[in-house]
Amino acid sequence: MNFYGDCRCTIDTCTEIWYIHYIETFRYELMKLHKYLESARVFIAFCDETRVKVLELLRSGEKCAETLLEQVSVGQSTLSHHMKILVESGIVTAHKVGKRTYYSICESGRQYAAEMLKRLTALTIKEGADAKYHA
């Protein structure tokens, strides 16, 4: 009998099997966490009045950073911070033309956020004792 119980394999093999199991478990947990982080990143984009105002301005079409800066009334570094969050969320896209950066609402990001909100707030009907509370 060795450290790993009644296992008749070598310690190296048992250690390798344990590591593979550990790595697979860790990978699974990371995938679950990534799903929640992705959702959080999208919703964080909506959790600031400046970002909401920027989204409202972008509804009418693409705008350069200078135009947004004038209309939002924040400093350049503050706007840059907010735009980074919006772009990382996938809701807004950015592209440079010369020294100017132009922003617009990303259609696929918009649809993704809407579908995510719908999925996360959809009620599920439970069967059994709780059914009367979810009907």
Image: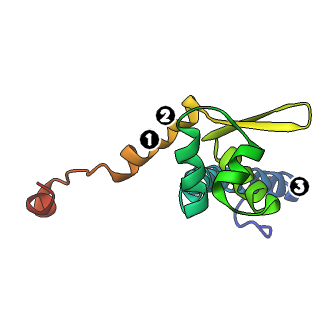
Disc 1 marks a residue whose amino acid type is: Ala
- x, y (%) of residue 18? 75, 57
Q: Which mark is residue 12?
A: 3
- The residue carrying mark 2 is 111
Name the image colouring.
Answer: rainbow
In the foreground, 127 or 3 = 127
Residue 32 visible in image? no
Left/right of residue 7 with respect to residue 43 in the rendered view:
right
Secondary structure at numbered mark 2: helix
Position above or below: 115 against 2: above
Q: Tell me where residue 36 sits by quadrant.
A: bottom right
Secondary structure under the numbered disc 3 in the rendered image: helix
The type of residue carrying mark 3 is: Asp
Q: Quadrant of residue 40?
A: bottom right
The residue located at (42%, 48%) in the rendering is 117
Instruction: Single out the mark in the foreground, 3 or 2.
Output: 2
SS assignment at label 1:
helix
Task: Identify residue for label 1.
Answer: 114
Q: Which mark is residue 102?
A: none
Instruction: Say which amino acid is labelled 2.
Output: Gln
User: Along the polypeptide, which appears first: circle 3 or circle 2?
Assistant: 3
Q: Left of 98 or right of it: where is 65?
A: left
Regarding residue 28, the answer to whether it shows in the image is yes
Which residue is painted at 76% across and 51% down in the image?
Answer: 17
